[in-house]
Amino acid sequence: MENRDKLMKEIGENEMAFPLTFKEWEDVAKEKMITGGYQYVSKGAGSEETAKRNRTALEKWSIIPRMLNDVSTVDVTTELLGNKYASPFLLSPIGMQKLAHTNGEIATAQACKKFMVPFILSTVSSCSIEEVAEVSNGPKWFQLYWSHENPEVSYSMIHRAEKAGYEAIVVTVDTVMAGWREGDMKAGFSPLSLGYGSGNYKTDPVFMASLKDKEEQSIIEEILTHIQHPQLTWDAIAEIKKRTTLPIILKGILHKEDALLAVKYGVDGIIVSNHGGRQLDGVIASIDALAEIKEVIDKQIPILFDSGVRRGVDAVKALAIGADAVCIGRPYLYGLAAHGKVGVEKVIERFIQETEVTLGLAGIARLAEIERLGMKREK
C-alpha cells in the first residue's frame, strides 16, 4: 500500500506537467501534429459506428470485485509466448509515427525499453526495423502487411526482423484494402503517398532490387501496390509459418470460427481487434468479440486484446474477460505527439499504475488470479 500511495503522490506532482486523461492527451496532440496528421490518426471508418461501439461496449462491462484479500502488493507480471514481462501491456502497431513526432518509432521504442513493454513495429513505419533495434534492446515484435505483389518482400522483412532480435511476427489480417475513411477523402490526405511509411521498404534489399526506377515517387507508388492484399488467405499464413521460427500472431480476429482456424493452422496467438474502428465500420466491438472467442479457444493459444483501450480499468476488464495481454494504441501515439519519448513513457506508466490500483481495489493481488473477478455485461 505504501508503494501505491507513493505512486499516487507522484501522479499528483506530475499532473500539471503532463496531461492525465485520454482527452487531455488528445487535445495536446491535436495542437502539435502536422496538418492532416491528427485527422488521419483520430478518425474511424464510415460513420465511426465501430469506433464509438468499442467505447460504449467497454463501458457496459462491469467488474464485480472481491473483498477481504491482502492487496498490499499487486503483481502485474505477465507470461506470454514463453517470455515474462513486467506488465500485461504491448504497444499496438501504428505506422508512420513521424506524423506525430520527428523521432517517430525510435522515440516510442526507447520509451518501451524503460518499462520492458513490447513494441510492435509496423510494416509502414517511418523508421526501419534495424534503426529501431539499434536504439532499443527492449522487447520488440514486428507487424507484417502481407505483400501479394511480391511475397519475397514479406519474407525478407520477416528475416530482417529475426536478425534484428524481434520476438514475434504479427500478421494483420483486417487490412486487405483501405477502410472507407471519409475524413481522409475530404482532406485529400494520404501519409503513405507523402512517404511517411517508407522506412522499411527503402531499406529492404528485395523490394529495392525489384524496382526499375528508384526515384522517390516511383518508390512510393510501388509501396502502395504492396499494401493492398485482398488475395490474403490461410494458405499465405501457412507459408509464413514455414518461413520463420518466430511465433506468428494474427491481428484482426473477431469471429470465433476464425479463432478456431488460427489454432488449426498452427498460429501461436491472436489479437482480437477491429483496428480501432479504422477499417470495417458497423462491426462488433472488440470487447464483445473477446468474450465469445475466449470460450472457444479455451487457453489453446494466447489471446491479446486491442481497440478502444483508453485507461487501466479498460485493460482490467479485458483481462478479466479473457485476454492474456492488452495492446495500447492511440493513447501512446498522442503521448508521442505531445511530449515525444517522455510522453510515451508517461502514458505507459499511468496505464500500469491505474491497472495496479484497479486490481487492488477489486481484491486481486496477482494478475494470474484475475479469473476470480466477476464480470457482468449490462444490456
Image (cartoon, rainbow, N blue to C red):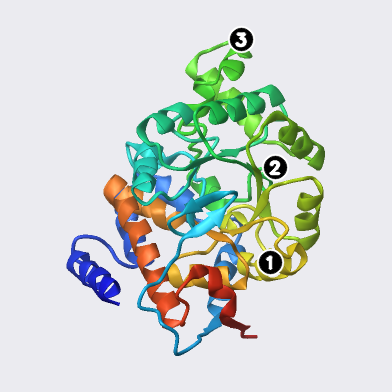
- Percent across and percent down for residue 53 are 59, 70
Quadrant placement of the C terminus: bottom right
Mark 3 falls on what kind of element?
loop
Res 152 → quadrant: top right
User: Could you classify mark 2 by the number of other residues whose Cα lies within 10 Å: few (under 14), some (14-19), or many (20 or more)?
Assistant: some
Q: In screen coordinates, is 372 left or right of 16?
A: right
Q: In screen coordinates, is 129 left or right of 171?
A: left
C-alpha span from label 1 to label 2:
20 Å
C-alpha span from label 2 to label 3:
26 Å
Above or below 140: residue 301: below
Does label 1 or label 3 sit earlier along the sequence?
3
Q: Is residue 91 visible?
A: no
Residue bearing the label numbered 3: 212
Q: Nearer the viewer, residue 224 or 2?
A: 2
Indicate which disc residue 176 carries. Answer: 2
As shown in the figure, which amino acid type bears the numbered disc 1? Answer: Ala
Above or below 140: residue 370: below
User: Which residue is rendered at x = 45% and y = 75% of the image?
Assistant: 365
Q: Is residue 153 visible?
A: yes
